[in-house]
Amino acid sequence: MPLARLIALLALLALGIATPARAQASDLAGTLARFALDRFPDTQAAVEALGASTHPTALPVLEALADGRLFARTADRAIVWREPGGTWRLALTGEAQADAPARPVRINNAIRRALESALGNLTLLAPDPARRLEAARALFRTRQGASLSLVRAALERETDPRVRRALLEAQAAIAVGAADAPELDRIAAVSVLAERGDREAQGILRAVADANPPERLKAEVGGAIRAIEHRLALVGMAQNLVYGLSLGSVLLLAAIGLAITFGVMGVINMAHGEMVMIGAYTTFVVQEAIRLHAPHLFDVSLAIALPLAFLVAGAIGVVIERGVIRVLYGRPLETLLATWGVSLILQQAVRTIFGPTNREVGNPSFMSGSVEVMGLALTWNRLWIIAFALSVFVALLVTLRFTPFGLRMRAVVQNRRMAASMGIRTARIDALTFGLGSGIAGVAGVALSQIDNVSPNLGQSYIIDSFMVVVFGGVGSLWGTLVAALTLGAANKILEPVAGAVLGKILVLVFIILFIQKRPRGLFALKGRAVEA
Amino acid sequence: MIARALHARFGGVVLAAAALLVGLAALVPALNLLVPPGSALHVPTHVVVLVGKWLTYALLAVSLDLVWGYCGILSLGHGAFFALGGYAMGMYLMRQIGPRGVYGNPVLPDFMVFLNWRELPISWWGFDLLPYALAMALLAPALLAFALGWFAFRSRVTGVYLSIITQAMTYALMLAFFRNDFGFGGNNGLTDFKDILGFPVQSAGMRATLFALSALALAGGLLLARAVVTSKLGLVLVAIRDAESRVRFLGYRVERYKLFVFTLSAAMAGLAGALYVPQVGIINPSEFSPANSIEAVIWVAVGGRGTLVGGAIGAVLVSAAKSWFTGALPEYWLFALGTLFIVATVALPKGLLGLAARLRPGRPRIPAPAPARLPAE
């Protein structure tokens, strides 16, 4: 029996080789048989034939081939594939088979390319829109000319607007490069690509312009390339601005607590960075607890961590104020040294408790991923941090302006002795103010844990920047802190592409050093006698 | 009056300390080189190197005390001056390696060959000559201090603001020196030194010589600083520290006095760095880290600011404690240092020397350094 089958198979094969067109059109069995020959050109031809067919078994067979799961059975040379689960299926019909000795169908690079485009073609018709979209995008990148008719067919059936758009672009990408296509079609394709307007579209158009196209097309292509360049430049600037805004909001978060302790109280708090670090570690502890006891709460872990971080860092701040800073009022330089000592102790304490290495703090689902707006890729965590920094700023302004505590605090800052005579307990207000500044630093730590490494050195990296922001903005002015943070953030990011990251940072530092010489009290200097006291 | 009182109390101490240092400069090398290793009097070479390193720290502390203790300028950038001096010396030592480097290039140091540089950058010219390198070790920090001070003192940046500016300066320098294309060895810094004036750096004789030089430099620094603070100029400096506006209203050009003492102090710190590098055998950008500068400040605070000798004592004590802790209890060193910062500022505003003076009644009390002014006075 096997012999008869073999002969029949060979006959089929002969037929397949002799008339590839017919095999491509209908004869699935013949196509599959070519895999069994184990000759690269035959395998490739079979792949291409399957790619153009609409048979339901074509997609799983090609996927299996791409993953090295396609086999020719040794016994009868039938083509079978093994599913990832381990089940064997016959390629021709898709029915399950018993395990039998088989030899894999080998592929080379040329076949891999053919496979990719064939798979792309087939998935264009897949039932899942996400897969169709991916296939259309892949086609845009590979631009396998043969699939133009398939794209048209897919376009006719397509209802999803996003997939339609991607298909149109893929069609345009193929058509614009096809020298034999009518010129008008190619010009229409140029306008579709110009509308897409990204670097890839520009690359395709460049390739067309280099291939000596007809005059009219050439003019169109040239115009489109320039339009895309212009657009890309604008997008680049916008991107830099967004990055700058994002860095600025990070600086704002890091500095705003310092704007209270240093700016309002005049305490040189070198342990400020450590308060940020403690906030970040509070987030870590909260997330660990959630992971162990209530994993479904993970998405609200930050909401739980925020008040906790405020309380923990605020409490530590109050202790520092009561224990150390109180003794040193009126001696700012000594305060600087003492709080530096505090910062060393806090760092080492965290290192002893949590270890010197980075700790893993996860992003909740709403903060991961990114959104694309007009060609700008914006990650959600950056956007959330911008929003968060601004809301912390507003909350602080409101606290200082409209709460009884804020009123007392401002009174103590403006005229301590008068405030005391009015019955305000100034020592208590001092401790609470310092606690507020520290607590806000802790809250900042929760946000920064999302974008930075949570390690004992976290605070060190922010302390100098924070002081720069507060001094640049004007000591004692919250608005100054806001403007300074955003300005420095934008300046850093605008200088970065020109001068490199490190040099950009150095330039900004030098600029601030010079700026302080010119305006020793910063951008938004407080005026009046209270300042001179 | 204050200066005279200080002079009366500490002038003699400085002289005694200088004499002691000169004695050490002769004695320790002798005990190291001439006494056989088995003898009880022998000073092992590693102790010579360690103490020699502390002596350069002490010189840095004296230079810092000169500006902070006597002029009220709390510089958080003296580590940068120290490191600049060290780099000048390191560059000389790199040029002395000559063709003995890994790549065997007779002129270019290894890291330049590695970076595919063809010729020596201008900033490295002349560093094959020791006198030039030493001059640069003094001049480079002095020039930087002069430029910074010129801008800062003229626009009356004082107190905490000046501290923060100097800290930003050393931070910016650290970032710059970490870059490979800045031309000073990037984050590896300069190391693998061979010899000075033909004598191997590692030899016991050179170690002892460097120790003696460090002790003499510290003695010289103490005497120079004493000469400055006991002169009429020193009187003005102390007056500036205690009431800057009043001194200005009396007609003194405050910024010039400050500029002078700041520049002088930076040059002293540079010399300390130049002596430090051959003893430890490496200089890299982490020497610029702001933490180092602040640590130098705590030496002065522990020893007692405005006493000159106090800074030197503080530097040696704290460094010795650090050596012991990092060997025996590395986990606890930062706790100890942090506590030291707090105790020194809260409980010992006048440092150990102040404590000593308070514990010996009958002697004239040291006038307390006036409480530092608020940033805006």
Image: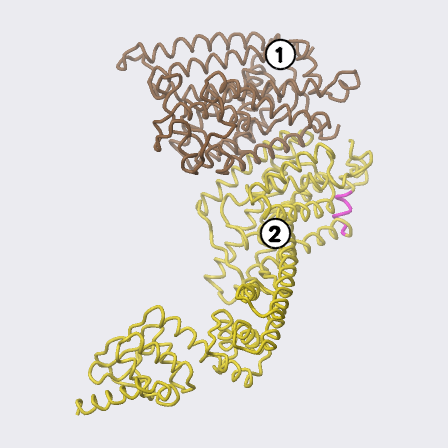
Chain colours: A yellow, B brown
Determine contact: label 1, label 2, CB under 8 Å: no
> Is circle 1 on the same chain as circle 2?
no
Compared with B118, B42 (above or below) is above
Quarter of the image with the N terminus of chain A in it: bottom left
Counting from the top left corner in percent of width and height, residue B331 is at 42, 37
Q: Name the residue at 58% across, 16% down.
A: B307
Residue B100: % across, % down: 34, 27
| Residue at left offset 48%, top offset 35% | B334
Residue A341: x, y in percent?
55, 34
Relative side of A521 to B204, left or right: right
Q: Foreground: B215 or A392?
A: B215
Q: Is residue B249 left or right of residue B316?
A: right
Of B329 and A105, the residue lying toward us: A105
> Which residue: 54% across, 28% down?
B79
Read off the chain for label 2.
Answer: A
Q: Image height check: is A301 above or below B190?
A: below
The stretch drawn in magenta includes residue A382? no
Label the magenta part by its dominant secondary structure: helix
Residue A164 drawn above or below residue A203: below
State how far apart marks 1 and 2 are (Cα): 50 Å
Residue B110 is situated, as x and y percent measured from the top left of the image, at: 39, 32
Give the labeled residue for mark 2.
A443
Badge 1 marks a residue whose secondary structure is helix
Q: Name the side, left or right, on which A526 lies relative to B287.
A: right
Point out the frontmost of discs 1 and 2.
Answer: 1
Is A404 one of the magenta-colored residues?
yes
Q: Amino acid at mark 2?
A: Val
Q: Closer to the camera, B320 or A366?
A: A366
- The stretch in magenta equals A403-410
Res B369 quadrant in image: top right
Label 1 marks a residue whose chain is B
Which residue was labeled with disc 1? B228
